Amino acid sequence: MQDLLITASRMSRVSVYHRYLQLVKKVAFGGVQVIPAGKLNIMGQYYVIINLDKQEYLHPHKFGDGLKLMEFGCSSYGIMAGLAILLSDGNGRGGGDLQSNNPIIGSWARNRIIVAGDYANVEPDGCDTGNLHHRAMHGDCTDISDDVLAALRDDRYFRVRSKRKIDQSPYGDGEEECTVDG
């Protein structure tokens, strides 16, 4: 039973994942007690938002959000606001729209978008070239987070309400290396 305890702080994320797979194989072939998935001490999955058509992505840390799905999915004045302006169609035609003429607004409308996790399967089309999160984080896509933030900050309403969140974020500016091993 002792070998079933996983201490994520002593192991890399990849090692933890491979140890988990070893445990699953042991359980499948009979030999050890089953531990419910919620009881395993595996680190959370990290996500980025990727535009598959344009090969661009948004990095949650740049918006002052965490990398885990619910850390940024429930935030306000963060990456979800950035995604909203990228997907908008018809901004600037009514009250409550973003007050900016930046051409990045609406540039992802009608494109294929995915919230890609670093534990996800290989690409949706079945190519065995690694998962989309890893490909984006290792140079196959362009990070447009700073450009999106510039468009958002054109709007006084957003600028005033988001400044505190982004400036005081514990996540830094997203410039640090985010890898599977780290």
Image: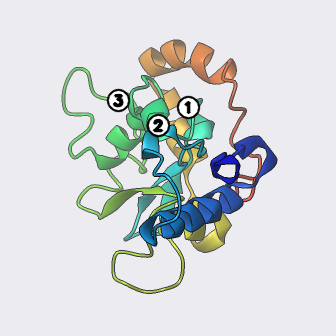
Q: Are marks 1 and 3 in contact (CB under 8 Å)?
A: no
Q: Between tags 2 and 3, which lies in front?
A: 2
> Where in the figure is residue 165, as x and y percent of width and height?
58, 18
Residue 50 occupies quadrant = bottom left
Residue 99 occupies quadrant = top left
Q: In the shown orientation, is residue 10 left or right of residue 65?
A: right
Q: Are marks 2 and 3 in contact (CB under 8 Å)?
A: no
Q: Name above or below for residue 94 compared with residue 57.
A: above
> Where in the figure is residue 109, as x and y percent of width and height?
27, 55
Closest to the observer, 89 or 50: 50
Neighbour class for label 3 at 10 Å: few (<14), some, many (≥20)? many
Neighbour class for label 1 at 10 Å: few (<14), some, many (≥20)? many
Residue denoted by label 3:
98
> Where in the figure is residue 110, as x and y percent of width and height?
23, 60
Q: In the shown orientation, is residue 88 left or right of residue 25?
A: left
Q: Between tags 2 and 1, which lies in front?
A: 1
Task: Give the mark nearest the N terminus, 2 or 3.
Answer: 2
Residue furthest out toward the bottom: 127
Identify which residue is drawn at 34% across, 56% down: 108
Amino acid carrying label 3: it is: Leu
Residue 180 visible to the viewer: no
Identify which residue is drawn at 50% across, 71% down: 131
Residue 23 occupies quadrant = bottom right
C-alpha separation, residue under disc 2 versus residue under disc 1:
7 Å
Q: Mark 3: which secondary structure? A: loop
> Where in the figure is residue 179, as x and y percent of width and height?
70, 57
Residue denoted by label 2:
79
Q: Are marks 2 and 1 in contact (CB under 8 Å)?
A: yes
Q: How is the image coloured?
A: rainbow
Q: Which mark is residue 65?
A: 1
